[in-house]
Amino acid sequence: MAFLLLSALLLAQTHSAPIDHYEIENGGLLEILKTEVTLLSNKSEHYSAQVKPPGTSRRMPHTIIIGVRKGGTRALLEMLDIHPNVVVAATEVHFFDWDENYVKGVDWYRGLMPFSYENQITVEKTPGYFTSPYAPERIHAMNSSIKLLLILRDPTERVISDYTQVYYNRLESHKPVQPFENIVIKNGELNTKYKAIQRSLYDVHMERWLKHFSMDQIHIVDGNTLIRDPLPELQKVEKFLNLPPRIVPSNFYFNQTKGFYCIRSDGRERCLHESKGRPHPVVNSTVLDQLHSYFREHNTNFYRMVHHNFNWH
């Protein structure tokens, strides 16, 4: 494990996207290290241990969940995994957004996919793809007709959720934390350079994707609705992916303790990891109004791009 951590640190230092001081101070480096350790240990601890079932092979993804971070990508992946015709990659691969992985080539990427039968589709998810300047062109070069899944939620809620993840990471690492307002507001103004705010500019990122893919290839999942009532959103995904309808109401049950829906399939019940659904901090109403105001024009632009109004603040 020490070797894995050292290797992860070296990879993080050569990470293609710039890692600024704020991201490091707020747990960004910790998240990179965790992901890199997962990737480095992945093949030796998980994939090499898999026994290849007769008639299966590792295949390139038929669809990719491209984002967005803290939008509900893990919930979407776990819920899709209910479907018997779906197999999912075990980890976020970061193939199309990280140069150090992309240069390893498509055979390396395929090697991280699960074994699947001919009647199954493979799904990979990496939330960082949506905001990556490289991912759209690279995915298009791999498969110009691929179908993409994008799950989004109210951009202000996404910013707060982004902060919440870093907040708990710092608490668990016994590091000091700052109130949300101290990070979002600088010198009395909204800190629009805050990475969490930048990630919520959906129109800016969507513009890059629409240069390479048509809206017929991109299905947007409403993350706010998925939390409240998952079945209709999953049924829309089934239809988009041309899957036979197999996800049914009995696959979900509401967990009163956790406050969100959990999954029931194959005689088992499971909920998302305890890191999901953490309570958000109570945010000053004036700061909320500033965020809503800042995102309003961006949201309007996004609605026009995708021909759908999500009625976010």
Image: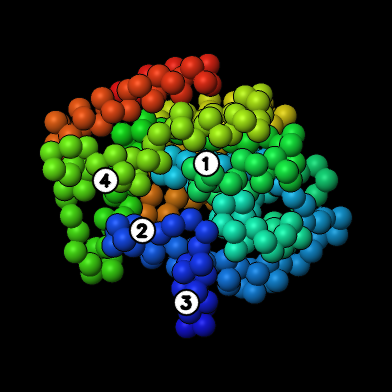
Residue that numbered label 3 is attached to: 5
Could you give the CA–CA distance between mark 1 and mark 3, rounded to whole angstroms? 27 Å
Label 4 Cα neighbours within 10 Å, binned few <14 / some 14-19 / many ≥20: few
Residue that numbered label 2 is attached to: 20
Q: Are the residues flagged by discs 4 and 2 in contact, CB closer than 8 Å?
A: no
Foreground label between 4 and 2? 2
Q: Is residue 204 left or right of residue 114?
A: left
Q: Residue at x 32, y 36 (%)?
A: 157
Asked if residue 86 can be seen in this view, the reply is: no
Foreground label between 4 and 3? 3
The one nearer the camera, 4 or 236, is 4
Q: Quadrant of the C terminus?
A: top left
Foreground label between 2 and 1? 2
Q: Residue furthest right?
A: 55
Could you give the CA–CA distance between mark 2 and mark 3, rounded to whole angstroms? 20 Å
In the picture, residue 58 is in which quadrant? Answer: bottom right
Residue 263 image point, x, y percent: 50, 44
Residue that numbered label 4 is attached to: 279
Q: Residue at x 32, y 28 (%)?
A: 295
Label 3 Cα neighbours within 10 Å, binned few <14 / some 14-19 / many ≥20: some
Q: Residue at x 60, y 68 (%)?
A: 42
Residue 98 image point, x, y percent: 56, 57
Residue that numbered label 1 is attached to: 130
Foreground label between 2 and 3? 2
**Nearer-N-terminus badge (1/4):** 1
- Type of amino acid under label 3: Leu
